[in-house]
Image (cartoon, rainbow, N blue to C red):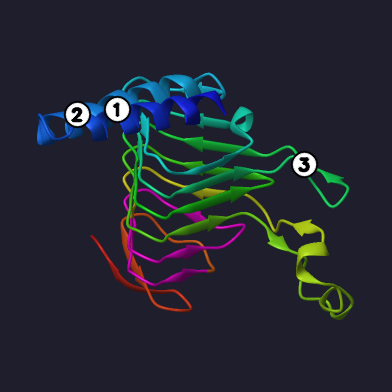
């Protein structure tokens, strides 16, 4: 890709000049490359709000089905995939990320159906949010190699406003997490979470409700 070639050129020029102004050039290099990269990729999305940033490196598939609000940050090594076809099936995926959302490093968001993340939501690292799986758990399906199984969705994922999602949380298909909920680290969310509640564990348990 052209932007990868330009990134390499900028990186090597910065390394050569590093001996003159090491710290300043490192800062300038990062800012220039980040601005160039985001300006380049922003045109591929349904919407890419002002002051939003996707940090390199990251993996993006199906940007034309992804909408990103204003002042969003998606940190390094994250994966956003919206699949419109797989194993001969076609889908109409949709990923919507609201304003002021902060996505941690190594987060994986993948859709064949719909994933909506409300404004002000914060995630830790290594979070997985998925509306699909490789097949179901029927006996017939389990005889098929996982990569060859048809993608299957139990339903959309909806995450409300101002939700806080801890490190290594997994949010499964067909789940709604309501406004203001807090999801503890390492939790597996396999049922809906009420508003302004604290939920932890695998499987998830509601341990506290605010009044």
Label annotation for residue 76: none
Q: Nearer the viewer, residue 47 or 181?
A: 47
Q: Are marks 2 and 1 in contact (CB under 8 Å)?
A: yes
Q: CA distance from mark 1 to mark 3?
A: 44 Å
Q: Secondary structure at mark 2?
A: helix
Location of residue 7 by image quarter: top left
> Which residue is denoted by mark 3 in the rendering?
91
Query: Is residue 94 depicted above or below 185 in this figure?
Result: above
- Whether residue 16 is visible: yes
**Percent of width and height locating residue 114:** 62, 43
Q: Residue at x 17, y 34 (%)?
A: 18
Is 175 placed left or right of 38 in the picture? right
Q: CA distance from mark 2 to mark 1?
A: 6 Å
Q: CA distance from mark 2 to mark 3?
A: 49 Å
Q: Secondary structure at mark 3?
A: loop
**Percent of width and height locating residue 188:** 47, 71
> Which residue is denoted by mark 2 in the rendering?
17
Q: Secondary structure at mark 1?
A: helix
The magenta stretch spans residue 173: yes
Location of residue 184 by image quarter: bottom left
**Percent of width and height locating residue 64:** 62, 28
**Percent of width and height locating residue 160:** 42, 45
> Which residue is denoted by mark 1 in the rendering?
13
Q: Are marks 2 and 3 in contact (CB under 8 Å)?
A: no
Q: Quadrant of the C terminus?
A: bottom left
Q: Is tag 1's residue or tag 3's residue first in the polypeptide sequence?
A: 1
Location of residue 166 by image quarter: bottom left
Is 145 placed left or right of 80 in the picture? right
């Amino acid at each position: 890709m052209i932007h990868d070639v330009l990134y390499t050129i900028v990186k090597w020029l910065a390394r050569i000049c590093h001996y003159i102004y090491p710290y300043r050039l490192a800062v300038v290099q990062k800012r220039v490359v980040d601005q160039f990269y985001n300006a380049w990729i922003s045109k591929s999305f349904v919407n890419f709000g002002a002051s939003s940033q996707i940090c390199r490196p990251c993996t993006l598939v199906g940007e034309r089905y992804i909408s990103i609000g204003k002042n969003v940050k998606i940190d390094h090594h994250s994966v956003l995939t919206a699949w419109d076809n797989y194993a001969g099936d076609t889908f109409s995926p949709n990923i919507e990320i609201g304003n002021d959302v902060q996505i941690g490093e190594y987060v994986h968001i993948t859709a064949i159906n719909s994933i909506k993340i409300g404004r002000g939501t914060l995630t830790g690292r290594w979070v997985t949010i998925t509306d699909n799986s490789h097949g179901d758990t029927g006996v017939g399906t389990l005889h098929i190699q996982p990569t060859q199984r048809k993608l299957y969705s139990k339903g959309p994922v909806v995450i409300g406003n101002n939700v806080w999602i801890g490190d290594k949380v997994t949010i499964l298909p067909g789940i709604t997490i309501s406004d203001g909920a807090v999801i503890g680290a390492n939790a597996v969310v396999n049922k809906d979470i009420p508003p302004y509640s604290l939920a932890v564990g695998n499987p998830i348990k509601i341990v506290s409700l605010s009044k």
